[in-house]
Each structure stands twice: as C-alpha cells, then as structure tokens.
Image (cartoon, rainbow, N blue to C red):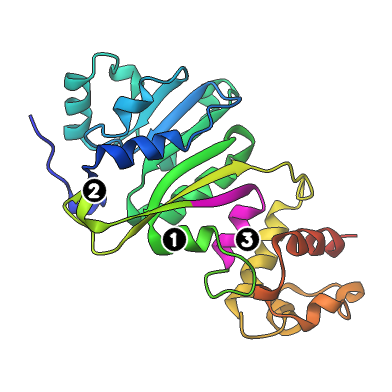
Amino acid sequence: MSVKAKKHLGQHFLTDENIANKIVEGLSGNDYKNIVEVGPGTGVLTKYLLEKQQHLYLAEIDHESIEYLKNNYLKITEQTFVGDFLKLDFNQFNQEQTAIIGNFPYNISSQILFKIIDNYALIPEMVGMFQKEVAERTSAQPRTKDYGILTVLVQAYYDVKYLFTVHENVFNPPPKVKSGVIQMVRNPKEGLAGHEELFKKIVKAGFNQRRKKLSNALKVLMIPEHLQKHPFMDKRAEELSVDDFIHFTQLWNS
C-alpha cells in the first residue's frame, strides 16, 4: 500500500532520510514527556521519533496515511492518532509538556504557529519545516523586510533559530518553493502575563501600516495620553525589537 499525496491537504512527502534525521535531531529532548508530529504522511520523520523516550502522538487527518502508518509501524495504534492539529485540545495530555515537530503543510503554516503560541505554556519547543519565506519571517531580526507581525508574536514566546534550507528535489511531489527548518525554544519572558490580547492588537496595528510612525499607525487603538509623546511614537513598527513591544504593552495599561 502506498500513499498518494493530496494537493488539498498540502502534502509533499520528504524522501531524503538524512534530512529527516537532521530535523528530528533538532529536538533537544529536554523537559517534556510527549511529542506531537503534525502531518506524518508516510512516516519519514516518524520512524526516528519512535526511537525517542517520549510518548509519540500523530496529528493526521488523511485516512490513507493513517492506515499506512498503522500497517508499517508496529508501535503505532489507533490511540497514537489525535486528529486535526488545529483542533487539538492540549489538556488531553494532562498538563504534561509536549513538543511539536513536523514537515508542516504550507497552506496552514501560520495557523500552526498561532496554535503553538496559544498553547505556549504546554509547548516548550518546536522543530518544523515550513515554506522558506515563512521560516525566514519567523526567525527575522528588526529593521529587515521579513520582520513583521508573525516574527514578533512568535518571538515574544520563543527563541527562534533558522537551522537549514531544504531544496525542492527531495520531496514527492516537489513543491514550487524551497523550504526552511526552524527550531523554536520557549523563552523565559513573563512580561505579557494578562496583556496577551493587547500585545497582539498593538503589534498588528503597528505593522498593518508599517510605513507610518506608530503615532499614526496606533490611532485605531486610542493611544493613552501618557504614551502620546513616548519616543517609540516617532518610530515605525519594524524599528522596535520584540522586547520593545512587550515593554510598550506594559506601559499602555500602567
């Protein structure tokens, strides 16, 4: 039995064993009991993950892939599968720390990152392959063209490292773009406790008009009087670091 890649699921099966092993080696293995692999497909990462000590779960919605994995890996049972990652309730893991890994479908890559952010307290790290452009945006630095909403929202919770680039010819079928593998390790920042929603609003408003100074871009949020002459107001969003955005959010309600 083989698995046919399905375009509507964004499936591009990795065929290079060396790259698969390198992706799995990107996980530190520290301080977590579970691993969830997103979109295992034909199991090119799965076979290496099964060798790890952690409890492995598979988030897969393709029935053909599910049957293939159950038939080819003795350790995989019906209970291994947890369905659609975007609908996954992390409380089912009894508050245990859970790492995420995957060759992610490009069509839902941003949604996957936001799902991780929303559950950051339970997800200490992630290693994943994305479209190269998304991987670069996630790991970008201030004052660069790739630095934007996704960058700041992810890096507020995780330290991001771009690991390596993957070429099109190691997939079946080959995607039309290169891929990038990144590692995200949860950082110890605690400055956003209770201010997460405000933080997101400030970041999104700032970058939605990224050519304008914050004094103009943030008008949609009713800038508090005590911040209207703050030095940040003369800067554009791309000039502020992640820590600047966190500090600014704290000042907003002070």
Kindly state the secondary structure of the residue where label 2 is placed.
Answer: loop
Boundaries of the magenta span: 148-162
Name the residue rendered at 90%, 76% in the picture: 225
Where does label 2 land, which residue? 11
Q: CA distance from mark 2 to mark 1?
A: 17 Å
Residue 238 position, x and y percent, is: 65, 74
Residue 159 spot, x, y in % from top left = 62, 48
Q: Which residue is mark 3?
A: 152
* Residue type, numbered disc 1: Val
- Residue 176 in which image quadrant: bottom left
How far is mark 3 from mark 2, CA to CA?
28 Å
Q: Nearer the viewer, residue 56 or 44?
A: 44
In magenta stretch: residue 5: no
Mark 2 or mark 1: which comes first in sequence? 2
Total marks shown come to 3
Q: Which residue is tagged 1?
A: 134
> Of the residues tagged 2 and 1, which is closer to the observer?
1
